[in-house]
Structure formats: C-alpha cells, structure tokens
Amino acid sequence: MAFYLAKRLGLSAAVILLVVLVLFSLLYLIPGDPATIALGPRATPEAVARYAEKMHLDEPVWAQFLIYVGNALTGDLGVDVFSDRPVAEIIGERLGFTLALVSAGLGWAVLLGVPLGCLAAVRPNTVFDRITGVLSVGTIAVPSFLVSIWALLIFAVGLGWLPAIGAGEPGDLGDQISHLILPAFAIGLSWVGYLARMVRASMLEVMGENYIRSARAFGLRPNKVVFGYALRVAILPTITLIGMGFGGLISSTVFAEIIFARPGLGKMIFDAVMARNFPIVQGGVLVATGLYIVVVLISDLVIAWLDPRVRESL
Amino acid sequence: MTRFNQTRRAFLAGTAAAGAAAMLPMPAFAQSGGGTLRLRLDGDIDILDPGYMTGGIEIEAQKQCLPFLAQYKREGGTFTWEPTYFVERLEQRDSTHIDFTLAEGLVWSGGYGPVTASDVKYSYERMKGTDWSGYFEALDRVEVTDARSGTIVLNKPFAPFIMVTLCHGPGAVLSEAAMKEVGERFTTKFPAICGPYQLELTPGQRALYTPNPDWTGPAPAYERVECPIITEVKAAELAFEAGELHCTEVGADTLARYSANMPEGAEITVGGELQYMWLGMNTDHPKLADKTVRRAIQHAVDVESILQGAYSGTTTRSYGIICPGLIGKRDSTRYYQYDPQKARDLLAEAGITGLDLTLRTLNTQERMLAAQIIQANLAGVGINVRVLPLDSGPFWEMGQESKGDTWQELELWLMRFGTTPDPYEATQWFTSDQVGIWNWERWTSEEYDSLYEEGIRETDPEKRHEIYVRMQEIMEETGAYVWINHEPEAFVHSSDVVVNAAPSGELNYRRFERA
C-alpha cells in the first residue's frame, strides 16, 4: 500500500510539473510581447518595465521557469498583474465557491442517479427502465451551458422563483443556498444520467453473479440483496467516475459560473485568459490540476479500501 | 410492471402544471423602491489609486468616494463641464491659469481633517510621476492661496485640461495626510474618503456602497448601491431581465432587440459614443501608394451595409475621428461617398486590375462581419481581399515599428480607437511623429501638425470646431481612411431610474436620480 501510494504521488508530481511547463510555455507561445499583451497597447513604458521586472521577463526563459517552480513549491504563485495581490490569496477566495458548487452539483446527481440506476437494473426492460434510459441519455447529451441558460430563463427570469446571479449575501447561509440551486442543478443534470447508466450496467453485471443468486436462493429480502450485496460491488466503478467527475468539474464549472455570475475557479481562469492575466491563469490551472489529481487519488484509495481484491493486487 | 396509464396520467398532469407555470406573466423589471440601487460591475476593482488604476470601474468607484473639481455635463447634443459641489468656484482665468475654491465643510473620513487646497496640490502634482502622467503633462504646478483656494498653473495653453483631466478619473483629489500614512500608494482601500458613499469590496463577488457617515454634502438619490460582479454582458442582460439589476450596459444585438421592441418598464440611455472605427490603408505600401487606388477603395465600401449587417443599425455613422457630442464632429464626408462605378473608374484610371489585398482585423464578431462586408464590397469592384483575423496581441503591434516588421506588410485594417470627450485626444495619434507608432497609415502633413498645436491652445469653441473639421478633411483627403461608425455606450435600465453616465461610459452612482 505504501509503495502504491508513493508511486501514485510520484506520478502526480510528474504530471503537475508537466502542466507547469506547458502553462509556462503558453506565455511565450502566444504571439506578441507578454507585457504589451497583459497591459494593453497604450500602457506607458514605465508600466511595461515594471511588469517585465515583476514577471522576471528580463531573465532567460529557463531561469524564469526555475524561479516559477521554486516559488510555486513554497506556495508563491506570483502576483496578479493588475492588483498586485498574491495569486494564491485570490485563488483561496474563489476555491470555496467552486468546491461548494461541485459538491452540490455532484451531490444531488449521486443522490438521484445511483438509486435510479439501481431501480432500472432490478426492473430491466420495464417501462421505468426505458424511461430512465431515455432520460439518462437525454441529460447526458444536453450540454451544461444550455441547461444553465434554460434554467436561468425559466426559473429566474420567467418564474422568478430563484435568484439569477451571484453567490448570495456573505454570511447569509440561506441566501447562499438559494443562489446555489440553479447552478448546481445545471452542472449536475448530465451526471444524473451518467451515474444512472453506469450503476445500471454495473448492477446488471453483478446481479447475474453466483453469490447474488445464492443470496436470493437463501430467501434474503430483495432490498438486502440489492443494496446490501449487489450495490456494494457495483458501486466501485461509479466511485472512480465520481472521483474523475469531481476533479473535472472543478475546472469545467466555468459555464455555470459565468452564466450565473458566481465567483469560482473556472470563471477566475476564464476572466484571466480574457485579460491576459497570465499569473492568475497559471496559478488557477495549476491548482485545478492539483485538485484533480488529489481527488482521483482519493477515489482510487477509497476503492482499494472498499475492495479487498484491489487492495491485494497493490 | 408499471401500469402505463398511471404514468401517462402523471405525465399529463406534470405537463399541464409545467405549461401553466410557463404561462405565468413575466416579472416586471426591478423597480428601485427602497433605497438600494443594483448595478453591474464588469470585473474586480484592482487598483483604486488614480495614479496606477486600470480605469473604467475604478474611476466609477473614485467618483463616489473622492472629491473632483469638475464633472461632465451635456448641453444639448454637446458634452461640456460644470463645477462639482466640491467647489464653490472653478474658473479658467486665462489659457494657463485655473482658479478654484473648495466648498466649505468638506471633511475626510478617518479624522484626516478638512479637504484643503493643499490636498489638491499634492494630488495633481503627484500624478506627474505616475502611470497616468500623460493627463498632467500640461500641469506646471498648483499654487495654494489659502486653505480652500488655489490656482492650477499650466506650463502651456491647454484648452482641454478641465474636460480631459479634471472631469476624468485622474482628476480625483486625495488626502495628503492619509496618503503619507499609507506610503503614498494604495490598491483596494481608499486611505481616506470624502463623498456620499463608502466602499466595501468583496473580491470576485461585489462592490457595496453604503452611506459615508462623515459626508456633509447633498445626499444621493439612493442610500445604498450594490454592484455584483458580472463579467459577461449577456449574463448581466439576463440578470436585468430577471429583475436583479436596475441598470446594465447592453451589447449591440440586445440594443437592437430592445430598440425594436422595448419591454415595458425599461428604457435605454446612451452615455456617449466615444469610439471611432475606420478602415485604414497604408499609404507607404506599394499596392496602395497611388492615391487614386485608395480613393477607389473609399468609394467602394458601403458603410451603411456595415452598420446594418455587422451592428444591427445600433451605431452612429462616422464621418471622421471626432465623435458625436464633441467639438469638431462632422456630418458628412468631403472626398468620397459610396459609388462602386466611380471606384471602378478610378481603378481603371490608375491602371489597376486584379488587385489582391489583405485586410487585418481583430477576431471579434462585429469586426469579422464588417471585414466580410468590406471584402464583398471590394470584390464588387474587382479587388480581391483576404481577411486576416488576429488576436489582440499581434493586432495591436502590427503597425508599430518597435514591435517588428509587420508594419511593412500592412495593407488594409479595421481599427477602432476610444477617446476622451475632447477632440484633441483623437487627433494626437495622427501627427507626423506618430508615424510607425499609432499613425499606421503613415502619412504626414505639416498643416495637420500645426493645427493640432493650434487646437490645444485655442479656447474659443467655434474656432476649435473649424480647426478639428479641417484636420479631419486633411485625413480624409489622403485617401487612407473609410470612416465607419461610433459605437454607443448604451445602458438598459428600469424606467424609474435616471442614469448618469460619463461620455466614456463610466456610471456615476451619486448622480443617479429617481424618475
């Protein structure tokens, strides 16, 4: 287990280093002078010189890279081009909103998708199974930005039931939850379909196993068989999917964050790209990548903990 | 097995409920009852310091919390200035002296005492060493007469100083004592304020303006102003339609939609149209060195088609670089009008056939559409145009000699500049010393250069008008320009709110009123 963990951590570090290298290269791959691009065409020479000094643009490229990596290892991701605020501090302010949104979005999808998948599997080829199948594929096919726009138009603009923009009044939990409903609905909808299909397929496979037939033959209650035995095994691939989904959503909430004008990591990166604010882009993507790796690692460890077969193979 | 008829009933009931919900009346736009005004902020406020700000929303914040000596005023269709309530007197004594007397009873927050003439001196003289020093190039010094009075002394006659500098963000006055205490620079917290509102920022979320307890001046119409950060124009438009904003800027397509069918309870206000776009031609390029060819292109472009096709008819047709509402604005072109046959004749006269040109443009939706219309127009007279869309980095460098050699290959391009509410600013980019910097058309004219200096010195509005009209005629006569449009700073707002927007689009919340 310890060797497995060390191996995974080493691989994660290599991936992060590669991401840093790619991000760093972007600064020079984009045509134009980085300082002019960031500060705009009418920036004064003094402002351009200050920016170049701040970003170490007068150093050789390899030295800039080493300085960046060295600083990043100590948690220093540089400073915002415009406000001079530490990038790490800015990311810290936004990260909580994204994690809340992803948790809520994936949370309701799990709560609905897993039972739907189970029910569809225990009643295969019924009307319920077919409707679930059609709805699952339907929700998977509809992109989240479209769901966001329609949810906003129907529930906020048309019906006025829920707030349209923002993250809610700071310190007012009820207001913050009401602001979370629509974006969480929008990003979670397609995951309901994914999870339902995934759980259904896994469950059908498990339900055909000998030990399930034995359990039934012993006269155990159907609920005990389904949720006590079958689901415990069938859920394992779903945990991997949830882990990857959580990691992916950290950076792909951008549409919901933009449409609902919520603060968050995705929107922060998008705004920074638009403003050519490279330190924020680099820091944001780095943190999102790191979180992705951590979440996937955790999901792998959870599977290893839950499944003795996986644990023994490590 | 589930009985189908039960599911069908449930489905029908659900559908009926959803249909009924959809039939509910659309909510009215937010009414500004209560004392809270909700407006869009298009991003985080980064640096409030007038010397190092980015501009735009930061200027909006300064206008609420800091004193200014002058403010914009619209007189008929023209922008001019008036003293603010921070001053009892603001007078241009002669071409280089501006006298002022601050209003009595103005105090800084935080116990920094009254607002003094010495604060004005400190604030303006400090600006000469900052990123916004260009606005104070003409400033020599500020002479302090007494605690509340002084004179702004210019080092040369500079007619636009009040309009361009004092009314705008760089004209903000800071507390000298408070600034000294914070090390003479600040970012997102004012060292001391003197205005109707105090500002509280929540990064990434909003700016909140609440009453300044130390404020002794007139109370604004709205006690509280909430500005959620909404970076995307479209998201802000939806927020307005959901009743969560009282006012927001709108894009060209929404402006067209609202103009054609204005929703009940909403109105449109245009702050200004201080952007000017044109099709530029490089007079030094061998393919365009012959003025007859350039004149042919001027005649070949159907500007009205661009205004309708790319901007849905929401922008004002341009006849030069001076924008609507400013001294020197022209109402017609002098040397060309859309006439494809004349264009063909001119090309024949120049002996040109099968001309291939490249048109560079920023890769935005409207510019791309405009470029494609120009491409079609020029194809109609026998000129083949390749449209080359560019990202902002290479686009803004392509005509600058200091940024590489692309300027030598430049043929045609679509360009848009923004300006301040005085004609001098727009004309400064086309003088002889700007060739290879911002004068990408690369022509020079001694008369233009001399008129530029004259326009800065001249204080008589009528004479200034003549100067700037003549300067635009010189530009047009070179054949290097096809004037296209002036895009508006348009705001949609609930009809019980009277919007106050600067000509360049910054909102001034404390000058908003209730209808």
Image: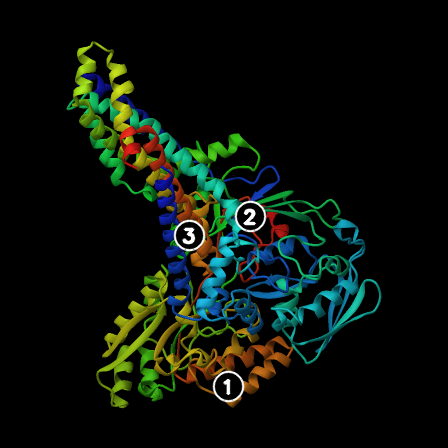
Q: Secondary structure at mark 3?
A: helix
Q: Considering only order in the chain, which callout, 1 or 2, is on the residue closer to the N terminus?
A: 2
For label 2, the residue is B203
Q: CA distance from mark 3 to mark 2?
A: 19 Å
Residue at the spot 40% in from the left edge and 47% down from the top edge: A254
Q: Nearer the viewer, mark 3 or mark 1?
A: 3
**Amino acid at circle 2:** Pro
Chain to which the residue tagged by mark 3 belongs: A
Residue at numbered disc 1: B432
Q: Which residue is mark 3?
A: A285
> Image quarter for residue A202?
top left
In the picture, residue B405 is in which quadrant?
bottom left
Q: Quadrant of residue B35?
A: top right
Spot occupied by residue B219 in the image (x, y as percentages of width and height): 70, 46
How many marks are shown on the rendered structure?
3
Question: Which type of secondary structure does the marked residue at label 2 adopt?
Answer: loop
The answer to whether marks 3 and 1 mark residues whose Cβ atoms lie closer than 8 Å is no
In the rendered image, the quadrant that contains the N terminus of chain B is top left
